[in-house]
Amino acid sequence: MSEDRNQYRGRIAPSPTGLLHAGHARTFWTAYTRAREAGGTLVLRNEDLDPQRSKAEFANAMLEDLDWLGIHWHEGPDVGGTFGPYSQSARREQYLKVWKLLLERGFLYPCTCSRRELSGIAQAPHEGAGTVLRLEGDEGPMYPGTCRPKGKPDVSQRHSSPAGANWRFRVPDGEVVAFEDGYFGPQRFVAGEDFGDFPVWRRDDVPAYQLAVVADDNAMEITEVVRGADLLLSTARQILIYRALGWKEPQWFHCPLVLDERGERLAKRHDALAIRTFRERGKTPEEVRGLVTP
């Protein structure tokens, strides 16, 4: 761990699965300005974790668009730095170490449920209330615990690799996860009520978002995570991983979402609101920043 652990270290973490849009511009500009105002370091991490969806042309485009927008970073895949590699596709060994630690401490179990099975459970009426299984944000339907061990997970069984199963983090039911958000203020979630056991490794042998982000932010000594408000619930899950590993969690700052004309959050399919589209239409960086500043 570096001697400058108390120095502000922020990060922007774009994913090269499409063109960056106005919502990304708001979040990344906020992260940049907060790092600049703190006199700290800004890290760019290429979150190319998904090999099927990540494309080199999008990775190049995101670097160009962010630079055009006026965002400058001190560490990243294009400029290097002490805490590299800065692309998630090159950090597999770090993720495996975290998976093994969580497994050895009894926080993980293998899950054989498919997406189709879970989708069927979510759509089926349930006994009593007669309503569908409620959703838990970005993770989809609340996991019903189909594969959850009845007792504590048996850590005596050795698994040399996570491949072949969906590995889930067993949440401590009833545990309160509270944190102070730099924008939205006090937040409070209850494990097992607001969210269930969540995936940390996919059966196709790809680390899941929750594990990879915690592993990277800790290894890169990030002191504040700035991202969109749609990830508030993910923060609660990640705090549980920090607690399980005995790591100090960063500060949190979640930005309001940029919505489309129907009031829905932007996705990378919104080409009309892509930073690249604004550039092609002759907008200046200042004009685009003015559009997305809260």
Image: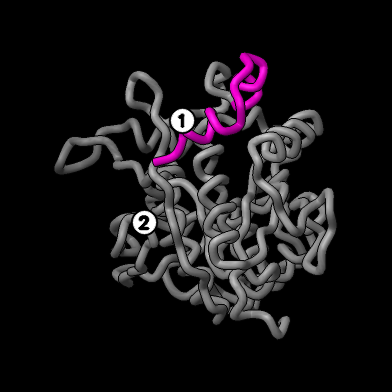
Q: Is residue 276 above or below residue 182?
A: above
Answer with the quarter of the image where residue 63 lies.
top right
Q: In this view, does 139 lie above or below 212?
A: above
Amino acid type assigned to the residue bearing label 1 in the image: Leu
Q: Which of marks 1 and 2 is nearer the N terminus?
A: 2
Magenta span covers which residues?
Answer: 275-294
**Residue at horizontal 37 percent and vertical 50 percent from the top:** 144
Q: Name the foreground residue: 72 vs 97.
A: 72
For the question of whether residue 110 can be seen, the reply is no
Structural crowding at the residue carrying mark 2, measured as other residues with C-alpha within 10 Å and reported as few (<14), some (14–19) or many (≥20): few
Counting from the top left corner in percent of width and height, residue 255 is at 42, 48
Amino acid type assigned to the residue bearing label 2 in the image: Tyr
Image disc number at residue 183: 2
Image disc number at residue 233: none
Element carrying mark 1: helix
Residue that mark 1 sits on: 291
**Residue at horizontal 53 percent and vertical 58 percent from the top:** 34
Q: Does the magenta stretch include residue 40?
A: no
